[in-house]
Amino acid sequence: MIFEISREGALKRLDAFINSELANYSSKRNFDLGPKDKSNVSCLSPYISHRLITEYEVTKRVLAKFPYHKVEKYIQEIFWRVYWKGWLELRPQVWSDFIEDLKGLKEDDNYTKAINGETQIECFNDWVKELKENNYLHNHTRMWFASIWIFTLNLPWQKGAEFFMKHLYDGDAASNTLSWRWVAGLQTKGKHYVAKSWNISKFTNNKYKDVKLNENASPLTDKREYKLNPINFVIEDISNENLLVFENELNLENKNLKKYKNIYLVLLSNEARKLKLEQNVLDYKSKIIDDQKKRFKDLQIINEVKFQTLTDEIKSFDIVHPSIGENFSYLNTIRKKKDLELNFVLNEEDKFSWQFSNKGYFNFKNNIPKIIAKFI
């Protein structure tokens, strides 16, 4: 699986999918045809997760070719990422608790065998290899993988979410963490996802048969409750001459960059991260940042060391809001340490959409036409 490392490449992939495969998406999307054939899905998530292209931009291009009712399922799937981000923004403690939970979890022999693809489950072992080699898995396979990890291998969901984040090009705090919670039965309490042998066989075209799984597992439980926190960010209100952009929020197409004296694009090294990434994932992030540098000449690419040096002299920044997760947590730490004034700028589309993330996805899904009508 090869991903183009550019915005231009992402748009070409999107257009090719729209023109050749989108019409059959609903009927074919659940099939995992193996690591060499992902033609039935768009494979745009590595770009969307970094906002090299946005969910709204994808939707606009799709609707330029098809009426909404013909592509409703695809658009709903695209908007899952918007929903997850909004859900976590409204409940940031979920991310903090996930990171804290990891500190107390041990890595035993069962865990070691799982991450090395040395279990008794052939399909799981193959998916571990595919994940490490391609830094990508089909979405349906991710659900099977997480279910086997939690309910058959009896491993902590948090360690599985960490494993995915280490290796996925499209790993982000919201989609990854909350999807694992959903499979476990924690996101929608009591409603979990249990992988079934017949389902794996059907949607891999019988590549894997008679998989021995725990198909009668009960959902996990967690007594912690999370209250809604209001989102209160500026929308495109430029108040500083210095702008910070992080690697998971790279869309600068509609930003008024001319008013900024300095634009800094930040990529944290593993030394600054709570979750350590594999080098090829960091390299992917670095390459897409370099692509933005080519397109926006005034960008300055920096790491956390350079950023902290800057904060010795500069105390006020506008920041394209990087969403709850690794980058946001890092910023909060530095803000307290260096006594910074940080003005988080949130795009209008996200702020409008996230208000519908206050409940489950069914409620959000019903409001997608309203989001489209307003912005697309």
Image (cartoon, helix red, strand yellow):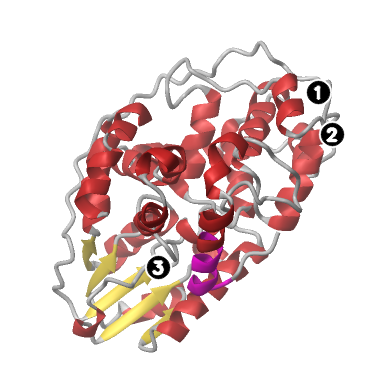
Question: Which kind of residue does numbered mark 2 sit on?
Answer: Glu
Residue at 35% in and 56% down: 60
The answer to whether the residue labelled 1 contacts the one labelled 2, judged by CB atoms less than 8 Å apart, is: yes
> Do residues under tags 3 and 1 come within 8 Å of each other at their CB atoms?
no
Answer left or right for 194 relative to 59: right
Mark 1 and mark 2 lie on one chain; the one further toward the N terminus is 2
Which secondary structure class fits the magenta region best? helix
Element class at badge 2: helix
Disc marking residue 252? none
Residue 124 in the image: state x and y as whole percent. Answer: 77, 35
Q: Is residue 145 left or right of residue 74?
A: right
Using residue 224 as the reference point, say whether residue 34 is left or right of it. Answer: right
User: Which numbered tag is attached to residue 122?
Assistant: 2
Q: Position of residue 17 (x, y in %)?
A: 55, 56
Image label count: 3
Residue 34 spot, x, y in % from top left: 76, 45
Which residue is located at x 55 percent, y 71 percent? Answer: 9
Q: Which residue is mark 1?
A: 211
Earlier in the chain: of badge 3 and badge 1, it is 1
Range of residues picked out in magenta = 5-14
Cα distance in 3D space between marks 3 and 1? 41 Å
- Name the quadrant of the C terminus: bottom left
Find the distance from the CA under tag 2 to the CA under tag 3. 38 Å
Mark 1 Cα shell of 10 Å, populated few (<14), some (14-19), many (≥20): some
Tell me if residue 77 comes above or below residue 326 in the rendering: above
Amino acid carrying label 1: it is: Val
Q: Residue at x 28, y 63 (%)?
A: 335
Look at 32% across and 58% down and name the residue there: 332
Check disc 3: other Cα within 10 Å, few if <14, some if 14-19, many if 20+. many
